[in-house]
Image (cartoon, rainbow, N blue to C red):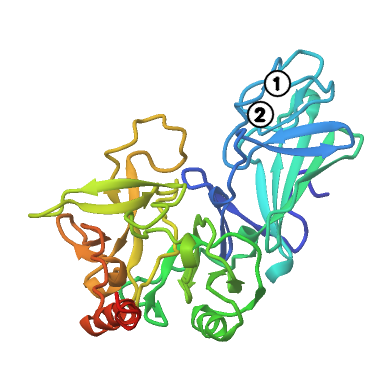
């Protein structure tokens, strides 16, 4: 007879590397550290009115359960007390981290990673089953009535047949002359998605109505009609096809009417002899990424990057992102830097960046136009004998 925690028939037994939280099952590997933990520090699954708090890569520490014992991987709140401190008689551990056994059940995109835990309070045990899906689905819990509990949810990480290949180098990987951005995922709704690699996705976006950029993740091409705030995931590669943004661009001239965007500050950055380089600079995201939309850039476009030190805002300013770092456009030539608005490619740091050192000069009125205006003004006066 199979033991309670023996792998199912036809399943592949997995090994576990605790340092990276990676399960290796034959030729397939799953890095569960890529599954972002919610801000509260644990996942929640519900079975009726009973919540279960659990983690994948560590014991639950943000919830305490009196009498639960050490290293609970999942805590049952059957008394429905308010977390984080659950009193005796209202909760129990339903398994101890790490998993007693782990196995891969099924093949291809139908495979599921099953993590089985023992050592819960009063003989409780649990299985956490992760299945393949394009997006994270909310976890659900079930109770078999015999102190055995099951939690199931889905995530794209389980779709991976192997650890993701290294992201392409932006120095030689481009779409339409613009460098690809490895490790960044565009947010917002898709205008189209389907199975395609980076090259095919680039060609599709280039010819798709209103497509401004794309992200490829796990072999799925996601076309976007806006370049909204991106996320950082090593499994993504993003390409920019059309960064047109009208009057709402980041990195625009600080001298223009209205100045910088609401999420930017004006910085004066020393850049060699002459006046400082003035820029509109958004804060870098927690993943070290920057807004993609920029005005008047040409191909190959200047590349948004986390380049500048923040010399304006004090710490604790209330903005999210990488403390003390600001975004700028990395460039190598003035023609990339909105020259019509006075932009130029400034030096003085490890990387050149686009800036607006002085206000754009007013456009001179041609002499011929001035003479015409003068003639139209004085002609009627002469005819009237003035």
Q: Horizontally, is 331 left or right of 245 in the view?
A: left
The residue at which mark 1 appears reads as 68
Q: Residue at x 74, y 67 (%)?
A: 110
**Residue at the spot x=73%, y=37% of the render?**
44
Q: Is residue 200 above or below residue 74?
A: below
- Other residues around mark 2 within 10 Å, as few (<14) / some (14–19) / many (≥20): many
- Where residue 29 sits in the image (x, y, percent)? 56, 60
Q: Is residue 116 above or below residue 378?
A: above
* Extreme residue toward the left, this view: 273
SS at mark 1 in the image:
loop
Could you say which is closer to the camera, residue 63 or residue 102? 63
Q: Quadrant of residue 128?
A: top right
Residue 166 visible? The answer is no
Q: Which residue is mark 2?
A: 72
| Residue 162 visible from this viewpoint | yes
Image: 314 above or below 274: above
Disc 1 and disc 2: Cα gap in Å?
7 Å
């Amino acid at each position: 007879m199979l033991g309670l925690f023996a792998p199912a028939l036809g399943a592949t037994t997995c090994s576990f590397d605790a340092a990276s939280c990676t399960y290796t099952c034959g030729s397939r590997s799953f890095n569960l550290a890529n599954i972002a933990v919610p801000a509260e520090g644990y996942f929640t699954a519900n079975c009726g009115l009973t919540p279960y708090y659990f983690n994948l890569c560590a014991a639950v520490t943000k919830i305490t359960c009196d009498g639960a014992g050490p290293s609970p991987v999942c805590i049952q709140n059957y008394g429905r007390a308010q977390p984080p401190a659950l009193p005796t008689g209202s909760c129990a551990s339903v398994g101890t981290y790490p998993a007693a056994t782990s196995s891969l059940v099924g093949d291809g995109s139908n495979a599921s990673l099953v993590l089985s835990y023992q050592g819960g309070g009063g003989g409780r045990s649990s299985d956490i089953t992760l299945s393949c899906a394009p997006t994270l689905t909310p976890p659900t819990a079930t109770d078999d009535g015999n102190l055995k509990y099951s939690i199931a949810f889905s995530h794209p990480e389980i779709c991976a047949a192997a650890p993701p290949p290294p992201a392409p180098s932006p120095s030689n990987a481009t779409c339409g002359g613009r460098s690809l951005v490895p490790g960044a995922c565009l947010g917002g709704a898709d205008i189209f998605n389907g199975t395609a690699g980076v090259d095919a996705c680039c060609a599709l976006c280039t010819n798709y109505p209103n497509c401004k950029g794309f992200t490829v993740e796990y072999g799925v091409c996601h076309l976007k009609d806006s370049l909204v705030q991106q996320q950082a995931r090593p499994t993504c590669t993003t390409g920019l096809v059309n960064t047109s943004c009208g009057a709402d661009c980041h990195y625009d001239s600080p001298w223009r009417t209205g100045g910088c965007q609401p999420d930017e500050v004006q910085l004066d950055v020393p850049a060699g002899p002459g006046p400082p380089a003035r820029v509109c600079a958004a804060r870098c995201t927690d993943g070290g990424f920057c807004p993609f939309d920029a005005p008047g850039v040409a191909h190959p476009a200047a590349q948004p990057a986390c380049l500048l030190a923040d010399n304006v805002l004090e710490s604790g300013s209330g903005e999210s992102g990488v403390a003390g770092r600001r975004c700028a456009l990395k460039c190598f030539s003035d023609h990339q830097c909105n020259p019509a608005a006075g932009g130029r490619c400034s030096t003085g740091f490890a990387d050149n960046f686009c800036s607006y050192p002085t206000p754009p000069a007013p456009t001179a009125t041609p002499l011929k136009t001035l003479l015409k205006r003068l003639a139209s003004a004085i002609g009627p006066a002469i005819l009237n004998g003035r």
